[in-house]
Amino acid sequence: MTDMAMTDVGADRPLLEIRGLHMHFPISEGILMRRHVGDVKAVDGIDFSLRRGETLGLVGESGCGKTTTGRCILQLERPTSGAILYDGVDINTLSRNERLALRRRIQVIFQDPYSSLNPRMKVGDIVGEPIQVHGLAPDAARRRARVRELLQVCGLNPSFADRYPHEMSGGQRQRVGIARALALEPEFIVCDEAVSALDVSIQAQVINLLEDLRERFGLTYLFIAHDLSVVRHLCQRVAVMYLGRIVELADCDELFDNPLHPYTRALLAAVPVPDPVIEAGRSFQPVRGEVPSPINPPGGCVFHPRCPKAVGSCKQLRPELRELRPGHWVACSEVS
């Protein structure tokens, strides 16, 4: 194969590819003799990929496995099984030193800007710590200059480097978290509910900042959220999770305009419309029942106990993701 052909293959390859990812947390009981009695199936066999420069939204109810998926990608959790391919390499097989090098390429923005920053450290030290740990600027003066540059990029006055987190607002703290994520010049960032703890007006500012940074630095985002309006504004594609599985995956506009899976339709129907006249005329049928326990999920399709389209076979057969339209994948045997 020629060098040009090899370059083309690398360009076409997804930056991140998830294959058959499972993350089961064991449950034990007993005091002296601990014994395994079950598992919490937080993530139960999911597949998806991200292209370079893309933002993929991962949505679903609380407890469906979104954050656990992100933590597995970040290697904060070791998956039970499955492959996580980053730039063609399975990161589950990397050594400790290789994972350390990978952390320069993959970073995270946490949900809570209050608990994710060390209250005993000044902002300059928080943002500068990863630069020091990875040896990118061993000279203190260069490190301080880089920190001030990052704060400015994220819309903060460089003088904030001398402040403590408690002296800042929630939006300012989240900008510090974004600056810290950018410190190592990553390619890929996991945004774990990055705006859900902020006021609506501050959310808009942070979302616009994330968009600007994506364009400026060519970043790729996995945007974990439950606010569908935010996802529609920021993401190119959306994956919908329910009880540890992906039930629908499509381009953003396609999914919002033509949802196919009954669960996706229920999620979108629950989003309020700002116009009171339109809202009054909508017919909304809430999903019946409660979300089953991930310790003992239903057999077959996990949504069948609550699904208005469920038939007998839904209780036995687990539906696989099928491409019903170009780029539109659905895990349901009753839609076409």
Image: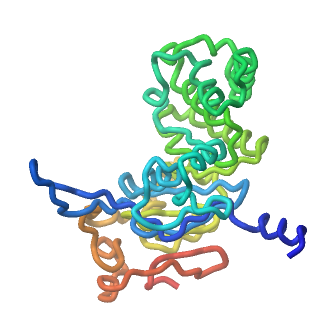
Vertical arrangement, residue 155 with respect to residue 111, above or below: above
User: Can you give x and y, in whole percent of width and height, for residue 95 in the image?
Assistant: 55, 52
Residue 252 appears in view: no
Vertical arrangement, residue 14 with respect to residue 97, above or below: below
User: Can you give x and y, in whole percent of width and height, for residue 246 in the image?
Assistant: 47, 67
At 47% from the left and 30% from the top, the residue drawn is 116
User: Can you give x and y, in whole percent of width and height, for residue 112 in the image?
Assistant: 46, 34
Give 15 or 194, whichever is nearer the viewer: 15
Vertical arrangement, residue 71 with respect to residue 264, above or below: above
Q: Quadrant of the N terminus?
A: bottom right
How many numbered marks appear? 0
User: Can you give x and y, in whole percent of width and height, for residue 35 in the image?
Assistant: 15, 59
Give 31 or 66, whichever is nearer the viewer: 31
Q: Is residue 218 left or right of residue 207?
A: right
Give 256 or 211, whichever is nearer the viewer: 211
Colour style of the rendered protein structure: rainbow
Vertical arrangement, residue 272 with respect to residue 82, above or below: above
Q: Is residue 228 left or right of residue 327?
A: left
At 43% from the left and 70% from the top, the residue drawn is 45
Residue 267 appears in view: yes
At 58% from the left and 46% from the top, the residue drawn is 97
At 47% from the left and 80% from the top, the residue drawn is 320
